[in-house]
Image (cartoon, rainbow, N blue to C red):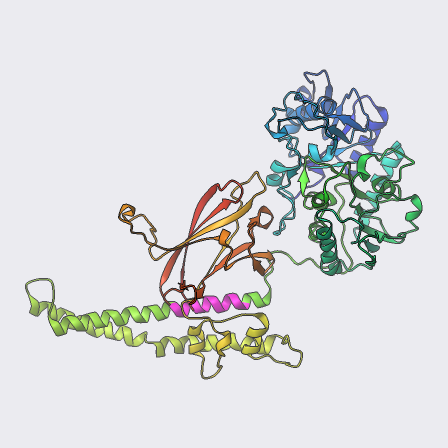
Amino acid sequence: MSITKDNFIVVYVYGNLDSEEFANYYANVYDIDVITEDPSGNSGITSNGIYWQVDGQKVGIQMLTTTEILDYEDFLINIEEPLSAALNSSELSNRNIWGILLGYRVPGGFYYEEACGIFLDEIDLIAPPFLIPCGSESVAISATSRLSRINNNFSLQKENKLYNRQVFKRFDSDDAELSLIVSRIDGPNLQFAKNIVDNAEILNKQFLVNGTFYIDPYSDKNTTGAGEYTDLLVDFYNNILQDLNLKDWITTFVDPYIDATIPFVENDSFVWSWFADRATTSFFQNTNAIRTFFYNADYDGGITVRDDSGKTWPYLALNAGYVATAGALSNPTIPGFLDPNAFFYSLLRGATIGEAFYFSVPHLDWTISLFGDPLVTCFFPGVETVEEDIINEHFVWEMMSKDLARSAANLYKKERELREIVDNIVDITSEGELVGSDITSNTEFAVQLLYPANDLLVNNKDIVWKGQLKPLVNKLFDFPTFRYIAGNSATVRPSINNYLSDNNFKVSRILANITSESIPIVESNLLDEGWWQFEFVLQDDDTTEYVNYHFILEVSDNENFDDDINISDGFTNILMTKDSFAITNWTYEKEKETFVSLTSNGVSSSYIGRRVRYESRVDDLLGINEYLTRGETYYFRITQYNIETLEQYTTREYSDIIYS
């Protein structure tokens, strides 16, 4: 089930009439339930004397202070503790609450000064911890970021396990165990906050966005990660932005010491830029398009949206009519900026703004806030979403070639087994060596077996099974000629060899031998005999932490691996063991159906559901030969492990026939 308005609560300051008016306004727009189902469990008082009340999906907290940015202890007392109590009340515990909207006049964050010798994730946060001042600079932590992990202990700059996952799925109950979707709507006055809701309602009714996308990939920053973030934005511009089917405007690189900036925007729907961190209202010119999402990657733009003379981007964007924006309360570090690829990859697949934000922010319990309506969904003109389970035609062809080769390998193996049976029977009848006293009767019995065994062999000889498979193999090899346009535009109808070369495919020699006369395959397009490739899907072995995985692969010719072997005698069924930390010949699916070489960092949690491969290798100079016997079935055992802790997880076992 995907997230909807029924999974949200809206939080207001109990006793503040404007704050409650805003909560009612938002609830009315979305038809959010404000009727109490369980009056006996809809209110309470915390140990610090803070009253809270739940009315359906509306939560009021009687805060002692509503300053925009609190200190850490005040945040715990006034917001986190009473909100946690409300979420655990009988009124809300019966609802699937996956998201929170912090309403007008609810504080937006807190200042945190690191404790000397104490890690926050080791502190019991039931009661406010005693923080020992160290003289270090305070960090302003976003309320939306912290409260997204309200069900978990505070862990400063926690890696977001939902970040940039490559196999897309909508936010669900499993995700809510890791992080809630939390946003904030606030401003210098009540009408400002209501205007944000009004703009969101217009977009939710219109759906389609068609304004210009302004992007600024360049800045004058030369600190750690600056070049990488520019590369990320350029990659987004060259790839995903084109899929949005929007008019775009991009800054021009001038000099590494000059921040090329967007002079102004008009008829805009999206802006993604960095780093110039201040502007004026004149930046936003007239627009006929719905302003949807604005993000400028800087260090402190989100520190306030209540100052009506403010010059920081989140305030200016909301004031200009943007439905949602994001900004940092203090320096998130450049690797902590939002990822536009993950953000728009999510929007293209039907995610709300709230989902897209939490799929694209690298850290939680950290400094970046989401402002605006988290329930907004938008669509792009003429864009059809390509779902994850849609398989590319070329990849389907390669899958078919491998599966057909496996079938041929099984028939190849069957023929050899029948030939071995016939040879053994012939040996028996010629030598008369049988177990038992009656050699004559045993020999006669063997002669009787010889005829049906030989018939089985004759009916399964290569001329027979190759003849059976040949029409199918020919169709497979003819398919590219009749279906695809060659990569080389000079070739109108590519031959199978053109097709294999263009797509960097190779086929089994068994299949090539079946069709060698009618459709010859050149040597460079053939797999070596004995070559094999092991492929598996990365799974989520650690469901709570963001992990970089490496792998241990074991190969055996016995399905029991070590079970029947006396290890103390130095024997084992394991033919080879390959640790991916060695990197060589390991690849992973970085993008759908695109494999790249593994690095020493391994494969992160973002790629859960993607595939990992190991390919056998031969190196005569190093004396390495990992090829196996054609037609034989081998057994593969894979174990994922955490590269940081070296913890090994559950082992999975597979088998495959060598079909090359």
User: In which quarter of the view is residue 414 placed?
Assistant: bottom left
Residue 266 drawn at (x, y percent): 90, 53
Q: In this view, does 47 lie above or below 79?
A: above
Quadrant of the image occupied by residue 21: top right
Taking depth in this image into account, of 390 and 584 the one nearest to the observer is 584
Residue most extreme to the left = 437
Left or right for 363, reference 437: right
Give, as a single range, the part of the protein colored magenta. 397-409
Residue under the point 60% across and 24% down: 124
Q: Mainly helix, strand or loop, the magenta region? A: helix
Look at the image and tell me in which quarter the N terminus lies: top right
Is any part of residue 85 visible from this angle?
A: yes
Name the foreground residue: 617 vs 324.
Answer: 617
Number of numbered markers: 0
Residue 344 visible from this viewpoint:
no
Of residues 90 and 481, the one nearer the viewer is 481
Please state the horizontal and vertical placement of residue 275, each as a whole percent of the image.
81, 47
Give residue 206's position: percent from left, percent from top. Answer: 81, 50
* Residue name at image x 28 percent, y 45 percent: 568
**What is the x, y in percent for residue 222?**
76, 49
* Whether residue 46 is situated above or below residue 376 in the rendered picture: above
Q: State left or right for residue 261 relative to residue 42.
A: right
Quadrant of res 465? bottom left
Residue at point 75%, 23% (across, down) = 61
In-front residue for pair 411/623: 623
Q: In which quarter of the image is the C terminus?
A: bottom left
Q: Does the magenta stretch include residue 407?
A: yes
